[in-house]
Structures are given as structure tokens and as C-alpha cells.
């Protein structure tokens, strides 16, 4: 490609040489060439110069136009016109003969305009049309301008050489010279190297369709017109990027307004990015490249972050709609099971109606359908789309596994048993579910988990009128060493230096009347032979009339007011000694809290080498809106992970201007501390959970009263107190799941009809889902605890079974029975209770008399208890009862009655059943004994 460009340029140079010698080399004419010119009126009576090629030789003819036409003699009929020009600022933009070529304002032009030796040359290749013995050529002429563009570009941005040639650009002294016909525009395709910093920044915008991409990087089409005058390529780049971003935002607004999706909070951030690009455009337009490129990079960075957040919000709507459909199907299935009649028809109709209502009233649902459009998919971030779809699929799979695949497991069976029990108590079940659903749906309007932008305000007394700006930095360091280790969160705030482009840009605002700065550096301070290194603040915004030193520095050097000290080799007089914690305020009334330590405050002449500007004070009339715009557009957030073998260290950095506006009666400062994850509505959440828990508890207590016989039957079939308690807990959880799903579905309609959220947070995408299920399930579980405990205490199934003699097994030399009592974890307390039976008064007549209790341990754990018991019934016998304690929660106590002498007599066989039955009754009082004991301890 490079060789080709050199060759063609050589031909163009040869043509220029022939311009002088052409008139002496023309041969005798053989045919006529008639030229018709139209377009610009001045061109109709001008001189048109044509260059044609014949047998690899070039000839130049001059055609004197009259009324737009002229006729010249040429040597042969088989020739090609390869160049043309007028003497004035008139350009040939179209030539038609056998073929037609035209200037179209892009690099694919078949007619190329360029400036050579003060002439506007048009290069083409056209064969004149033959009519009889005459050749005809039509030419369109228009006035044109020659523009000079400053060719300086940021690193990584360039224009390919072959593009320059096709566009006719000539370069001289750092400027591009190009021709643009009046009323037209020329598109300059600039390319960005994808490996450069600027290229990587632009590459982030290509993911949303803001700018185009070519096979080797990013392409920025920059349009130039005559009205632009002599400007710079950098200005055209900034204007092009700003225009394309504005077009993108307009398309997004139109799409989002069509589906009813609220994205103002995201587009507001894009608006600040566009504002920065406008400021960059202004700086580059006046030739301030340093400021312009800095603002351009800052604006593009902010735009990329804002568009990523908007793209994530849009793609999250797809995941939310999939989850919404899943919950809708789950809810319709539950309702059809409760209704019982024509379940399939009820399920299908209810699901269809709810799905149509969701599409009609919920913006997220319409946004999800809008993603079926290729145009919308093109503007979506692949990363955001992938993340949202993965989240949705995992949630749906979890729900499907819980509701369908888990069928046959204990929890699934208990859940559907709870649904069946709701059929028998439809009114109570419906009222409970509706209550939970209403609470869950309303809670999503004012309870949210999301991010909050923390803005700090401060006011200071002053008579200053204007604006002061400094750079505030917040770093949050998270040190995670493990769940069982001491973890730390370290928050540090400080101020950083303003860059020279920032200072220049701020000082160049149109309303500024006077500029003050505060420069900070380090320098040695000397007095009386003592020397110390101190922070020097050099400023012209102080009214001290000398220098001020901090108290700590004055004590170290032995300095008092009126003394002369040396600062960076300069002798100055101390006029004030101030407290380290209260540095003096400057002209704007704001204290010097940007710096700390031993401090010296003086004039600008004290600025040490290498000082940086930490505050800019601009005098003039300015409103509070400027300060708000400044802090919003300057806000930056970054995340860095520090490699460490001992802990996971994450450093989050927030940067923002501190903008202070003085109105003559005081100065008010604003700054953004950072964006932090928070949960709003905490007091309301506690109240909601309490009310919902009470509702579930009342409903389940009524269920216990109605189902006393049912629980007794379950107990008779062998259900343990834990099983009955689990049934009540699962039933309460079922109310929470069904109510939460219904609340989430209803909450989406509520959020769609609410103009704005009550919470100041920017909620995370799945905050409504989290809030609805949390508000529904947590109270349901809490409200189920009391009924589950009451059911376990009321329905002690062993008491119905213990008196059945068939459960006591009489063997040849012993008797055995099981006592359904769980004591895993409190063996020592149980041993103490059994020993207390020895102190019980002797029974009158029938009953056991406990004589001795001895516990046996293995591995520091009680394995079994020996109880020597004398039992009197129809007969009397002495037994040695061994109580084997359970090793796991699912086991019961096993009681084995033996003869202490080893002889199992008729008396033992006759009294064994009565003994073990009475022993069971006594041991089951352990629960009441333990509860009473703990109550007394409290």
C-alpha cells in the first residue's frame, strides 16, 4: 500500500511540471471537445484548465467559458481527462462523460480534491462522451474553502496515510490542508489504536453502539465544514464524540419512554459526561490541548461508567421478567391447588391473565420484550446480558428444583401437605396469604438494598463571593482474613493536588473575575540554629500580611510572633502562631484542612520547588448549581485488589471536588464522600416483620386448636414432637413463600404505578425480589416458632403410647422399653433430674421407690445410668434399671429392667410392665422440671 501511494503521488507531481510546458507541446488538433459547466454562477464565465492523457502522455488545455460552455481542440477521440482546476476558489465536484465521477465528502471519492501550489485541483479519470465527431464533457463547479487543521492528536489516535491521499490532504508545518465545497461536509475517519489508553477507553463505548468499530480498532468519523474555519483535528474529535453520545442518549430516551422504563438516574450521569465533552470541545476550540484532552478523557470515562450501569439495568429487566414469569406460574399453580376444581383450566387462565397484565403495566416486562429487537441487543453490554441471564437461570432452576424435583422429599411432602391443609381452611389461608402479600409488596416501595451517594455539606462564615475548588479523596480498605479471624475496614479521607489542566480549565470559566491559588510543598524552616522540615502553603488568598506558623512548629523552633525565620532560604517575619487543629481560613472562609502537620502559611513567593496547587479560589458571581455540577462531573470511583498471602485486601477509592460557593454572607461547601452499600427502611422493616409475624402466629395458633385430633392421630401413628413441630414450621414457611411470591408479583405492579421510590437509595436490580421474600419469609418463620413449640408441648405422643403395655417387651431375663425423650447435649442435667427422684417421698401403696442412681461415663460423656428401684403393685420386686442415653438426635432413651441379683423371678415378670410405664411418666416430666428450673434461675 505504501508503494502505491508513492507512485500515485509521483504522477501528480509530474502533472504539475507539465502545466508550464504543455502549451508548447500540443500537436495539431484532430477533433473538438465541447465542455458544459453548471453550478456556481462565477464559474460559468471563468477559465477551466483540463489535463488529459493520451498514449501515456499528458496534455493541458485551457477552456475559456462563456455562459457555461466552451470548445477546445484535442488530438484524438480516445483520451481520458485526469485533472481539472479553475483559477479562483472554485472546485470541480462532478465530471460526466462516458462515465461519471463525483466528490462525495468521504475517502471513497472517485473525484479527489486537493490543494497544490495555491490551486484547488480535482483528480479523476473520465472519458468524454462521443456524439458524432464531437466529444462532450459535463462539469459541475462549486465554490470551495481551503481549511487548515492542527494535526496534533493524543497518543493512540491517528489517520491512515492512504486515507489522507484519498481525501486529498496535504500536510505542512503540523497542519493538514484540505478542500471542502461550500454547503457540503468532509468526513475524516480517524482510527484509535486498541492497545493505547485512549483506544481502550473508546473501545468501552463501542459495546453500546456509540461509535463504530473496524477490524483493527475503533473508528471516529469527524465531520468538517467550511463554517468550522481553521481549527484542529482534536476539536473535531471532541465534537464528533459529543454528538454521537448525544444521539445515543436521544435514541435511548425514545426507546425507554416508549416502554415506560425509568432511566433518568442513569441518563443524568451521561448528561454530566456530555457536559464535560462540551467543555473539552471549548478548550480544544481555543487551542488549549492540555486542558481539552484531559476533559475529554474524563468525560469519556464517566460516559462509559454511566452507560454500563444503564445497560446492566436494562439487561436485568430480562432476568427480572423471567423470574416474574416463574413466580407467576408458581402462584397460579398454588391457587389452582387451593381451588381444587378444574385445576388445569384455572392454572392456565390465571397464568395467562397475570402475564398479559405484567406486559401491559410493568416496564421491565416490556423492556424484556424490547430486547427481541436486534437494534436493542446491539446496544446491550455482553457482560451485563450474560450476568443477568445467569442470575435468572440459576434462580429459576432453584425454584424448579424446590417445587418439582424435590417432590418426594420430606420438605416437599410437608409443603404440599400444608397446601392441602389450606384447602380445608380456605378463608383463613387466603386472609393470611393476602396479609403477607400486601405487607411484602408495600415494603418493596420503601425498603431496599442498594447504593447511596453520600454528599457532605459544610458552611463557613465569610464575605467571599465566588467559588473555591479542591480535590477530596476517600479510600476504603477492606482487609478480609477469614470468617474466624479479625477483619478490618479502614476509611481514610485526605485531599489531593489539582492537575495543571484542571486549574487552567477552572480559571478559564467565563464568569471568573480574579484568581487565587493555594500551592503546597515541603521546605526546611530555620530559626536560631534550629531546623525542621515543614509543609508550606503559599497563597495569594490570605490577609495575614506576613507568615503564620503552627504551634507545634513554633515550639520546636522556639518561635514567637514578631520573630524572623528562614523558609526555603527566604527570611520572613512571623505575624501569627495558630493552633495545629485550627489552621487559618483563606479568603473563601474555608480552613486549610487539605494539609496537616507542622505548617507554614505565607505568600506565593514562599512556594517551594515542586509545589502543587491544592485549592483554586475564583472570584465572581456564581450559583450553587455550578458547585453541584462540578462535584457530580468530577466524581470518580476505582477498585484495586492488593496481592497478599495473608489476607484479601481491596482498596476502593472515591475522588470528588470539594466545591465551595460564597454568596457574600457565608460559604457553603459540597463534596461526595463516596458510594456505599446500605439498606433503607430499617425501622419500618422491624415494624413490618413484627406485624407479619403476629399475623402468621395467630393463624397457626388457630390451626393448632382446630387440628388437635389430627395431631393426636399423627402422634398415635408414631410421629415425634419434633415431627409435629417441623410440620408447623413448614406450614408457616409455606405461608411465607406463597405470600412472598404473591407480594413480589403485586409489588411489581405497585412499583410500576408509583412515580418515584420513597427510598433515597439507588436500589440494586434484585432488591424488590430480596425485599419481598425477606419480609414474607422471616416473619412467617418467626411467627411459626411459638405455635410449633405449643404443638410439641400439647401433643406429647409418647403419653398416649406409653400406657400401652404392648410397647414394653418382656424377655426371658429382662424387660425393655423406649422412652421418646431427646436429651442430646444436656446429659448432665438429665442425670441430676434422675437423682432428684431419689429424694422424692415414698409412694403410698402402688408405685416406684427410687433408691440409688449412678451415672457411667465413657469419653467424658454419660453412656448409661443405673437406677435401683423398688416397685410395688399387685406384687413387689426390686429392679436395676439401665437407662442407655441416645447418641444422636433421632434416637430415644432405651430402658432395660434387670434383677439386681441376677435371678429373674415371677415377681419381676409381673411388675416389669407397671415399673417401666411409671418410669416413663416420671422421666417425661423432665421437660417441665428443666423449664421450671431455668425460670427460677432467671
Image (cartoon, rainbow, N blue to C red):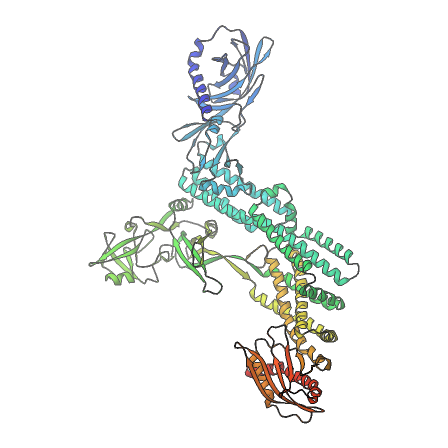
Q: Please tell me which residue lies in front, 215 or 845.
A: 845
Tell me: residue 495, above or below residue 735.
above
Of all residues, the one furthest to the bottom in this rendering is: 844
| Image coords of residue 90 (percent x, y) | 49, 22
| Image coords of residue 14 (percent x, y) | 43, 17
Specify whether residue 138 is in view. yes
Horizontally, residue 570 falls left or right of residue 136, namely left
| Image coords of residue 226 (percent x, y) | 49, 30
Specify whether residue 381 is in view. no
Q: Please tell me which residue lies in front, 332 or 681.
A: 332
> Which quadrant, please, contains the C terminus?
bottom right
Image quarter for residue 130? top right
Tell me: residue 766, above or below residue 775.
above
At 73% from the left edge and 80% from the top edge, which residue is drawn? 806
| Image coords of residue 937 (percent x, y) | 55, 83
Count the labels in the image: 0
Q: Please tell me which residue lies in front, 284 or 818.
A: 818
Of all residues, the one furthest to the left in this rendering is: 529
Horizontally, residue 563 falls left or right of residue 866, namely left
Of all residues, the one furthest to the right in this rendering is: 341
Amino acid at each position: 500500500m505504501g508503494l502505491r501511494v508513492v507512485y500515485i503521488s509521483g504522477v501528480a507531481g509530474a502533472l504539475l511540471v507539465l502545466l508550464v510546458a504543455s502549451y508548447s507541446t500540443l500537436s495539431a488538433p484532430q477533433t473538438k471537445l465541447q465542455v458544459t459547466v453548471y453550478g456556481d454562477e462565477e464559474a460559468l464565465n471563468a477559465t477551466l484548465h483540463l489535463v488529459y492523457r493520451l498514449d501515456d502522455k499528458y496534455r493541458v488545455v485551457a477552456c475559456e467559458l462563456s455562459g457555461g460552455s466552451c470548445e477546445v481542440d484535442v488530438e484524438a477521440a480516445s483520451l481520458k481527462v485526469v485533472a481539472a482546476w479553475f483559477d479562483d476558489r472554485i472546485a470541480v465536484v462532478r465530471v460526466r462523460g462516458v462515465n461519471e465521477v463525483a466528490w462525495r465528502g468521504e475517502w471513497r471519492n472517485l473525484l479527489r480534491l486537493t490543494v497544490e501550489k495555491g490551486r484547488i485541483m480535482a483528480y479523476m479519470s473520465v472519458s468524454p462522451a462521443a456524439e458524432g465527431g464531437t466529444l462532450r464533457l459535463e462539469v459541475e463547479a462549486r465554490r470551495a474553502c481551503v481549511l487548515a487543521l492542527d494535526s496534533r492528536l493524543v497518543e493512540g489516535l491517528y489517520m491512515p496515510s492512504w486515507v489522507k491521499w484519498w481525501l486529498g490532504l496535504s500536510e505542512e508545518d503540523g497542519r493538514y490542508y484540505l478542500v471542502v465545497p461550500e454547503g457540503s461536509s468532509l468526513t475524516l475517519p480517524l482510527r484509535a489504536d486498541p492497545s493505547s489508553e485512549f483506544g481502550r477507553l473508546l473501545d468501552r463505548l463501542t459495546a453500546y453502539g456509540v461509535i463504530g468499530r473496524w477490524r483493527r480498532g475503533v473508528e471516529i468519523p469527524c465531520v468538517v465544514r467550511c463554517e468550522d474555519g481553521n481549527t484542529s483535528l482534536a476539536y473535531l474529535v471532541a465534537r464528533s464524540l459529543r454528538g454521537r453520545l448525544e444521539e445515543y442518549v436521544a435514541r435511548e430516551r425514545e426507546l425507554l419512554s416508549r416502554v415506560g422504563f425509568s432511566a433518568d438516574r442513569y441518563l443524568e450521569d451521561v448528561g454530566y459526561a456530555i457536559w464535560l465533552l462540551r467543555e473539552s470541545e471549548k478548550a480544544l476550540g481555543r487551542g488549549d490541548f492540555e486542558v481539552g484532552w484531559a476533559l475529554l478523557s474524563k468525560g469519556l470515562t464517566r460516559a462509559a461508567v454511566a452507560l454500563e450501569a444503564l445497560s446492566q439495568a436494562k439487561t436485568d429487566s430480562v432476568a427480572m421478567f423471567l423470574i416474574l414469569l416463574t413466580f407467576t406460574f408458581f402462584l397460579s399453580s398454588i391457587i389452582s391447588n387451593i381451588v381444587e376444581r378444574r385445576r388445569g383450566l384455572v392454572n392456565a387462565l390465571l397464568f395467562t391473565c397475570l402475564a398479559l397484565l405484567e406486559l401491559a403495566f410493568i416496564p421491565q416486562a416490556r423492556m424484556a420484550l424490547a430486547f427481541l429487537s436486534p437494534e436493542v441487543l446491539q446496544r446491550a453490554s455482553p457482560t451485563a446480558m450474560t450476568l443477568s441471564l445467569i442470575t435468572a437461570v440459576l434462580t429459576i432452576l432453584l425454584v424448579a428444583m424446590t417445587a418439582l424435583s424435590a417432590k418426594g422429599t420430606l420438605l416437599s411432602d410437608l409443603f404440599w401437605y400444608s397446601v392441602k391443609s389450606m384447602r380445608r381452611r380456605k378463608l383463613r389461608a387466603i386472609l393470611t396469604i393476602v396479609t403477607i402479600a400486601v405487607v411484602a409488596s408495600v415494603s418493596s416501595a420503601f425498603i431496599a438494598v442498594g447504593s447511596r451517594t453520600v454528599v457532605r455539606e459544610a458552611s463557613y462564615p465569610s464575605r467571599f463571593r465566588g467559588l473555591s475548588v479542591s480535590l477530596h479523596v476517600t479510600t476504603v480498605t477492606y482487609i478480609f482474613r477469614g470468617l474466624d479471624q479479625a477483619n478490618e475496614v479502614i476509611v481514610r479521607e485526605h485531599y489531593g493536588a489539582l492537575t495543571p489542566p484542571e486549574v487552567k480549565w477552572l480559571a478559564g470559566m467565563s464568569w471568573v473575575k480574579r484568581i487565587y491559588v493555594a500551592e503546597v510543598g515541603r521546605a526546611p524552616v530555620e530559626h536560631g540554629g534550629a531546623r525542621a522540615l515543614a509543609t508550606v502553603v503559599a497563597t495569594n488568598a490570605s490577609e495575614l500580611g506576613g507568615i503564620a506558623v503552627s504551634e507545634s512548629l513554633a515550639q520546636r523552633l522556639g518561635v514567637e510572633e514578631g520573630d524572623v525565620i528562614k523558609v526555603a532560604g527566604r527570611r520572613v517575619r512571623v505575624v501569627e502562631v495558630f493552633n495545629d487543629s485550627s489552621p487559618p481560613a483563606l479568603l473563601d472562609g474555608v480552613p486549610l484542612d487539605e494539609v496537616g502537620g507542622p505548617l507554614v502559611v505565607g505568600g506565593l513567593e514562599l512556594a517551594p520547588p515542586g509545589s502543587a496547587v491544592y485549592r483554586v479560589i475564583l472570584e465572581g458571581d456564581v450559583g450553587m448549581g455550578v458547585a453541584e455540577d462540578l462535584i457530580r462531573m468530577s466524581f470518580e470511583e476505582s477498585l484495586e485488589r492488593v496481592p497478599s498471602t495473608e489476607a484479601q485486601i481491596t482498596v476502593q477509592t472515591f475522588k470528588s471536588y470539594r466545591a465551595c460557593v460564597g454568596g457574600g454572607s457565608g460559604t457553603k461547601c459540597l463534596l461526595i464522600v463516596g458510594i456505599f452499600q446500605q439498606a433503607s427502611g430499617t425501622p419500618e422493616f422491624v415494624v413490618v416483620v413484627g406485624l407479619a409475624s403476629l399475623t402468621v402466629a395467630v393463624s397457626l395458633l388457630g390451626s393448632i386448636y382446630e387440628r388437635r385430633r389430627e395431631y393426636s392421630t399423627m402422634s398415635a401413628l408414631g410421629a415425634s414432637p419434633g415431627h409435629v413441630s417441623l410440620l408447623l414450621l413448614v406450614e408457616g414457611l409455606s405461608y411465607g413463600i406463597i405470600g412472598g411470591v404473591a407480594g413480589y408479583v403485586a409489588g411489581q405492579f405497585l412499583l410500576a404505578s408509583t412515580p418515584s421510590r420513597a427510598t433515597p437509595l439507588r436500589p440494586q436490580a434484585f432488591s424488590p425480589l430480596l425485599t419481598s421474600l425477606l419480609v414474607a419469609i422471616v416473619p412467617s418463620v418467626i411467627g411459626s416458632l411459638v405455635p410449633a413449640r405449643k404443638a410439641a408441648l400439647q401433643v406429647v405422643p409418647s403419653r398416649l403410647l406409653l400406657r400401652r403395655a404392648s410397647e414394653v417387651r418382656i424377655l426371658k431375663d429382662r424387660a425393655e422399653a423406649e422412652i421418646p425423650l431427646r436429651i442430646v447435649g444436656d446429659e448432665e442435667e438429665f442425670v441430676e433430674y434422675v437423682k432428684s427422684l431419689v429424694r422424692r417421698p415414698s409412694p403410698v401403696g402402688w408405685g416406684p421407690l427410687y433408691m440409688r442412681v449412678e451415672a457411667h461415663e465413657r469419653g467424658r460423656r454419660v453412656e448409661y445410668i443405673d437406677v435401683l428401684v423398688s416397685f410395688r403393685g399387685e406384687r413387689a420386686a426390686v429392679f436395676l434399671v439401665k437407662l442407655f442415653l441416645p447418641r444422636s438426635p433421632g434416637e430415644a432413651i432405651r430402658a432395660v429392667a434387670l434383677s439386681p441379683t441376677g435371678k429373674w423371678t415371677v415377681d419381676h415378670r409381673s411388675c416389669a410392665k407397671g415399673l417401666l410405664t411409671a418410669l416413663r411418666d416420671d422421666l417425661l416430666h423432665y421437660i417441665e422440671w428443666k423449664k421450671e428450673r431455668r425460670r427460677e434461675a432467671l
